[in-house]
Image: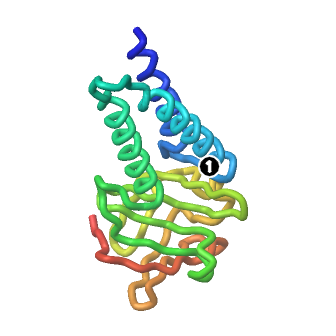
Amino acid sequence: MKRALKYALLIVPGAMAIYIIVPIGDHCSGLARSLGWLLCVMVYLICLAFTGSGSKSGSRSDPVPLLITCAFVGLNYFIFSAEYGEKPWSRKVMTGWIGPEDAKRAGLALYTDGTFTAHIGYVDHGCTYTGDYTLANDTLKLLRQDISQMTHGMFAPAYRLFLPGSLLQPIDMKYEPVQITMDKILRK
């Protein structure tokens, strides 16, 4: 019973830290999310200090807290990598930015698995919206009806691809074009 409580004291704050940062679907992150994650990590470290070093002299140390810590560090690394564009299950084929590249306020990324992410960065937080896309006959369609509303008019539902200028020109001219860089255009 004492061991189960010791492990639960480690698993609960670790699981809460992962829950706070897991990027499922549309999500926003900012200072509050970062502080919540940091608080959970600090609670985890305090629990680890009290539970990991409680062995009596002459007895073997318990490897389970170290294994739990390694698992949570690995999961956090995997989640942070996936959130910032490095999805292990898919590769980027095209990225683009609205406005000057150094500002990077709004970005669009297309992946080999037919999904896209549209990211908008604000002063104190950023929001990411996901969905599917099709690219055929130099026309890119973001298969999400509410993409314009969700991104406050930053992204259009359809673009025309211009390769010489590396530009995605919105079909509806009320939107701004997207400057693109690409590894390889995926044509379906």
Q: Position of residue 124 (x, y in %)?
A: 71, 59
Disc 1 crowd rating (10 Å Cα; few below 14, some 14-19, many 20+) is: some
Along the viewing direction, whichever of 59 and 154 lies nearer the viewer = 59
Quarter of image, res 88: bottom left
Q: Which residue is mark 1?
A: 34
Residue visible at 54% across and 53% down in the picture: 129
Return the residue found at the far right. Answer: 123
Q: Nearer the viewer, residue 11 or 88?
A: 11
Residue 82 picture location, percent across and down: 41, 54
Residue under the image location 39 percent in, 85 percent down:
163
Q: Is residue 33 above or below residue 99?
A: above
Residue 149 vertical position relative to residue 70 in the rendered view, above or below: below
Name the quadrant of the C terminus: bottom left
Amino acid type assigned to the residue bearing label 1 in the image: Ser
Type of colouring? rainbow
Q: Residue furthest bottom?
A: 164
Q: Residue at x 54, y 41 (%)?
A: 41
Q: Nearest the camera: 174 or 131?
A: 131
Picture coordinates of residue 86, whole percent (x, y): 38, 60
Q: Residue furthest top?
A: 1
**In x, y percent, where is residue 185?**
31, 74
Please state if 75 lies on the left or on the right of 172 as rendered: left
Quick check: 136 above or below 166? above
